[in-house]
Image (cartoon, rainbow, N blue to C red):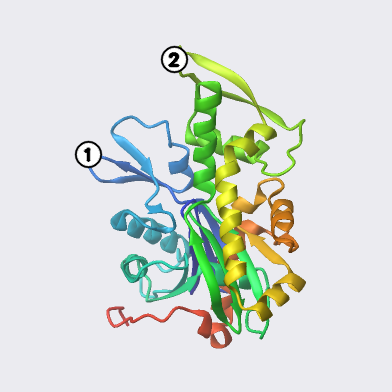
Amino acid sequence: MDIAIDLGTANVLVYVKGKGIIINEPSVVALNKNTGKIIAIGRKAKEMVGRTPALIIASRPLTNGVVADFEITEQMLRYFIDLTNKDNIFGFFKPRVIIGIPSGVTEVEKRAVENAAINAGAQKVFLVEEPMASAIGARLPVNEASGSMIVDIGGGTCEIAVISLGGTVVSKSVRIAGDRFTQDIIDYMKEKYNLIIGEQTAEKVKIQVGSVFEPDKDLKTFVYGRDLISGLPKEIEFSAKDSSEALYKSIKSIVESIKEVIETAPPELVTDIFKQGIALSGGGVLLRGFDSLLTKETGIESKVTDDPLTAVVRGAGIILEELDTLEGVLLKTDYKDAPR
């Protein structure tokens, strides 16, 4: 039962060989601060965010795509690995695991992911950079002698890469993504409307009216929170135009980073990208108008891939199914410590 995992800052997705994607849960763990015992993992834990007493902490063990809390990450991985292997009641069979990680992470950060997965019950761990996995999931011709460009905006990082002949030619990992967008909305509400809202409310607003380019004037939602001055409940109307203003700086930084990658790519590959276009994946690219804005700013047609939220895990799953032909895209690591 070999598995592929998109170990994201916002969500964990698990692909089982021969079955497809069977788990899609938030990367959130609820912990009893006094006992150290985990109370909930995934969707149930996320429902507790902003609603827990002082005794309980609901948090994400990954920050900006890398492990921030090793022990909790390990327990979260063990929980999801066990869910995929329910019939293995005696624990005899340990799966091989492919995990997507951000490009440009340090060797220490890579090793933290490997060790967490091995301690959680993996027999052997393979790592693949998220932009490569996302490009494969989007069915880009990554092994051909032509340039393919992928932009994947997840919860913690924006991954930008130009790929050719099974390798990454130019890449950049920007720690501005979905979580930053959510915080941008929280900050904007506070500054413009004197309204204090929580993370879950801001995330709902982002989904409902999130827009970055030529916002629809009629797209609005009502937001409830606490008035900064009176401390009492307050309701305001929040529009797509408000959203575009709130997200302006973050989106501008991402677009500038994409331009930098294009500018540093070999001219032959830039020609290929111009013909093929830029593929967009990850939840962040679902902001209204992002594809149109990027097309306008770069002069290259930008398209959101089919089911952008699952591109990374689908790509890792394809590598799992076709390991003999796609082994070259995996990161080279040493597994002397791994159990046989």
Residue indicated by mark 2: 231
Left or right relative to 14: residue 124: left
The quarter in which the C terminus is drawn is bottom left
The percent coordinates of residue 297 (x first, y second) are 70, 55
Among numbered discs 1 and 2, the one appearing first in the sequence: 1
Q: Is residue 90 visible?
A: no
Residue drawn at the location 58% of the way across and 67% of the way down? 261
Q: Is residue 280 above or below residue 30?
A: below
Res 246 → quadrant: top right
Q: Is residue 8 above or below residue 332?
A: above
The percent coordinates of residue 18 (x first, y second) are 59, 74
**Residue at the outermost bottom position:** 324
Residue indicated by mark 1: 34
Res 145 → quadrant: bottom right
How packed mark 2 is, by other alpha carbons closer than 10 Å (few <14, some 14-19, many 20 or more), is few
Left or right relative to 73: residue 101: right
The percent coordinates of residue 59 (x first, y second) are 38, 44
In front: 239, or 139? 239
Res 333 → quadrant: bottom left
**Which amino acid type corresponds to the residue marked 2 in the rendered image?**
Gly
